Amino acid sequence: MEYPDNIGINMYKWAKDLFPICRSLTGQGVRDTLAYLQKLIPELTIESINSGEQVFDWQVPDEWNIKQAYIENETGKRVVDFSDSNLHVMGYSAPVDLVLPLEELQQHLYSLPNQPDAIPYVTSYYQRRWGFCLTEKQRKSLKPGNYTVKIESTLTQGVLNYGELILPGETEKEILLSTYICHPSLANNELSGPIVTTALVQWISSLVNRKFTYRIVFLPETIGSICYLSRHIKKMQANIVAGFVITCIGDNNDYSYLPSRGEHSLADKVALHALENSVESFTKYNFLQRGSDERQYCAPGVDLPVCSVMRTKYGEYPEYHTSLDNLELISPAGLQGGFNILQQCILLLENNHKYEVTVLCEPQLGKRGLYPTLSSMNEDYTDIRTMMNFITYCDGNHDLVDIANKIGCYAINLIPLAEKLYKEGLLRKT
Amino acid sequence: MEYPDNIGINMYKWAKDLFPICRSLTGQGVRDTLAYLQKLIPELTIESINSGEQVFDWQVPDEWNIKQAYIENETGKRVVDFSDSNLHVMGYSAPVDLVLPLEELQQHLYSLPNQPDAIPYVTSYYQRRWGFCLTEKQRKSLKPGNYTVKIESTLTQGVLNYGELILPGETEKEILLSTYICHPSLANNELSGPIVTTALVQWISSLVNRKFTYRIVFLPETIGSICYLSRHIKKMQANIVAGFVITCIGDNNDYSYLPSRGEHSLADKVALHALENSVESFTKYNFLQRGSDERQYCAPGVDLPVCSVMRTKYGEYPEYHTSLDNLELISPAGLQGGFNILQQCILLLENNHKYEVTVLCEPQLGKRGLYPTLSSMNEDYTDIRTMMNFITYCDGNHDLVDIANKIGCYAINLIPLAEKLYKEGLLRKT
Amino acid sequence: MEYPDNIGINMYKWAKDLFPICRSLTGQGVRDTLAYLQKLIPELTIESINSGEQVFDWQVPDEWNIKQAYIENETGKRVVDFSDSNLHVMGYSAPVDLVLPLEELQQHLYSLPNQPDAIPYVTSYYQRRWGFCLTEKQRKSLKPGNYTVKIESTLTQGVLNYGELILPGETEKEILLSTYICHPSLANNELSGPIVTTALVQWISSLVNRKFTYRIVFLPETIGSICYLSRHIKKMQANIVAGFVITCIGDNNDYSYLPSRGEHSLADKVALHALENSVESFTKYNFLQRGSDERQYCAPGVDLPVCSVMRTKYGEYPEYHTSLDNLELISPAGLQGGFNILQQCILLLENNHKYEVTVLCEPQLGKRGLYPTLSSMNEDYTDIRTMMNFITYCDGNHDLVDIANKIGCYAINLIPLAEKLYKEGLLRKT
């Protein structure tokens, strides 16, 4: 594709910069993240919606910010410290400043017995709690006695922020790219999402004669997409022809596909065609295995044509939602692979015309230098057959991807052929 | 379900009472049978249609009654006696009083060489004949010589009887239950049918807020359903949304499904869903293997949505249409299993609403106590996922059974969940 | 079927007569071939279209005729001679009269290294070339030196000929049979085509009460069908309900089916049903493997319901397009098999009515002598079941072939049953 080879390396650098920021549904970490992305894509605008506002069945939560947090033992040693890892504090923890014995402290500790070296990622957005997350090893090393726990956080009337970007095209019909920015220090799920999306935005901006308008959003998962839909649902329903939730797109393992609720939207068709023809293998999930913002975009009554193309799907790798989902799990090559597959989905959408042949019967291709004038069994007709097969399904009913599926080749490879025949006047676009 | 545990035992007792009655298409045996059932379901009315009346392409046959019948050998010993088994006389046998040699008698004897201990069930409804059915063993023991044969039967202008019962519901839309009462002393095919139907009627009568009206008929097979259709076809075509032919429903072996002619009616959908989710295994037949009153209900131009849910299907067990299809072949447990599966079909029909979620995007279930407020990998989300999966298909297009099929669970188990969400105001019925 | 047993032998004789003629897209060979066929089917008319005429995207080529051609070595010996085989000269070779050394001659020679005993069939219709085709063995035996090459051919303004025949039926709806007459001395591909078509025409002419009108064409492949379509497309689109390209229909090996572009036309349904029920096995190709005039008949915008029923498909046997596709490859039995399967397709089309039963519920077949009056397990009900199964799908929606597919039998065998029930007044045709 027409993109610098070092995009994987660039993306990985962005991930390193963004990794330390403590993101959550709301708060300074989200704003810092959006500010960083704005430097890479200046057209990005940062929007806000007030705490307490009703959005469909939900209310925008209070804004959460945190300065410091730790657990100190009797000797004054900080045995768990937020400054070591954002994950050490439960997301949306209420402030606390207490001395309490280990037995009581245990009620507020979260660890994973089966993954003794991993700090789990735990949140309590809609119920006031406080808590610390730590490795099972750390937890076992805690001796009986009193502990000082301190969480210097605030939960106050504020705003929920998200980033929005509209890249206009030749038509008002839209492609939606949606990614989330609410997970602290988690690399594959989530940083890979906003990072690959940012690289895609840079590439889309550079496309001349863009057919579609692109709606790109960076928002906190669930409540963010609900907020966004509550503001824009009518326009989105009128215009969006295909959309992708972009997440878990930076590791080097699997490729994955999770369909829209209807399973047969244009987004689904294109995603499946790209995966079937451009990667060695991938896992096909069903909508029952959903877990991200397609839950909102595909909800009944919302019904947007949105699916997910991922590398290893959330919930399907052991590091998921733990401190092991870190910068070692993703890589420049992993991010590049994710970028490539989504780029191809977009290229397919941009070129997915319905063609109709302009002459009755087969065109005389010989006189146009497109067909051998000698008929003999010794010739290799493979490319000729592909061309003739392509033409025979140019009936105005099949789009480029349909035809590629019919004739068993990758639609990306048919684009130059279609353009050549179009320029010869043998095809019209319907 | 809400039914006494001893229903299987009750049903078996009814079978024992009804077994000795000599039923046929017409006659006193049919009336005695209907009178017995009327004691169990007092709303049952007994209808009649005159011999000779034209019903579509058929004519109601003469009424057949029989007092006694036997074959006596030269020593005056009764070697075959109707009083031993109703099956000994061919159904609709003309009267006869003759002395004739064994060779001539043989023309009127029916036995099964491959089942030497079984008396076959033979009828000749529409051609005047006389005949005796006996075991192959009995037949072989007959010595050469003269035999006195006597059949004291009458074939006279009379009536064909059937039982009918309409249980009104909230709507005029109807469920049809059809079963037959024309086989003498045959237990699985046929007594299990009217008996399980009677138990279902008692249970349906007890249902409060019945959505559907129930049309239940007890009639002789083929000519009975033709008579009934000739009187009620317009109303049945206007109102019946699902129906079941109830037969072969009392043995303890297989479960079976035989589709309607169209194969995709509501009755079919519900029957398949119930069988797939509530019994260990079942045999799925196709409409080419039909053999009971669905031949009339599903005939072209009649086109009612009627299928059969059975235990072992007629024709598929060696005792079928012989004296071995007796009270030992059926059992309280067998009848109870048959009752249960049909009861579940009816419960599914009564509860098979199309639901539509009342809010856009996912509802906030946490604030209603329906969703955990703590997000952590340690939780078991199975029930939560079932609920979320159920909600996501509540789009007004899928009914309860459709959704259950989509999300891979038994719709019966979704009923309480659907009712809970409906009471929370999160669902409407469409 | 109602046809003399020796039709295979007759057809083979016609093949022998036609084999030596040098056919091409145009010229005297085509006219001689059509004149021969006209003797067998006098209603055949011979049409012409002028060289240079525009037909859709094509132009009718000049007429090609050839008197003699040879290559002589220095000793005056004719090492390659057109009088030995029509295939020795490239089709549409320009005239030439030259002496040139072997090295230069090689540029104009065509042989098959992998088939050293076969003369390849090579043409250059739309680019002026000259060339000789010979066996690899002949080629290798050529010694260095000068050769005299002479091709006495003409390429002049003339006509393209084709044969046309309309056999009127009860309706204007048409069956199309299309076969080609442009290959010189090739037996399976092509002579089997016009020969079997001719035998079919003789048989169709003899049919009384033909339902369909038959449009039969004998034309040069590709340019011929394009010419014909350019003249008749509107009427053909209005009337043709099914059509067959008839080619490769005389060998004794495989049977083959190649669908129309849409794959689900009446022609496809009938062809598949006939092949599935009347030959032991066959190969099912897809439209990507097309290669004859269905390329034109099924082109987008033309969209005629035309498929191919063949014996071994073109391109799928080693003798294809070489001198080995000769009279030894085809046989009376091979041609007869091809005739039979196409005859059955036509019989199916003629009898493929939609039937509707005239009575509600099952008809009383006993009173018509069509059903046993004795009901007993000892009877064989196979034929009865077939009849009842047939009747139950006579709902006005299924045609004869649909019903045969539903009930698992060959529709040809249902025709007498359908006629019997129709005469009884139990069926109407819709």
Image (cartoon, coloured by chain):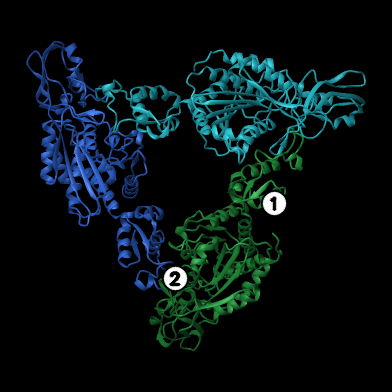
Chain colours: A blue, B cyan, C green
Classify A269 as above or below C295: above
Q: Which mark is residue C419?
A: 1
Q: Secondary structure at mark 2?
A: loop
Q: CA distance from mark 1 to mark 2?
A: 52 Å
Apparent side of residue B39 relative to residue C109 in the rendered image (left or right) = right
Answer whether labels 1 and 2 touch (C-beta < 8 Å). Answer: no
Viewer can see residue B284? no
The location of residue A213, given as percent across then percent down, is: 23, 50
Amino acid tagged 1: Glu
In which image quadrant can residue B301 be found?
Answer: top right
Quadrant of the image for the N terminus of chain A? bottom left
| Number of numbered labels in the structure image | 2
Q: Chain of mark 1?
A: C
In which image quadrant can residue C247 be found?
Answer: bottom right
Classify C290 as above or below B214: below
In which image quadrant can residue A323 be found?
Answer: top left
The location of residue A73, given as percent across then percent down, is: 10, 15
Q: Secondary structure at mark 1?
A: helix
Classify A75 as above or below B100: above
Viewer can see residue C343? yes
Depth check: give the residue in front, B278 or B290.
B290
Apparent side of residue C423 relative to residue B82 in the rendered image (left or right) = left
Q: Which residue is mark 2?
A: A376
The location of residue A413, given as percent across then percent down, is: 31, 57
**Residue name at image x 48 percent, y 69 percent:** C229
Q: Chain of mark 2?
A: A
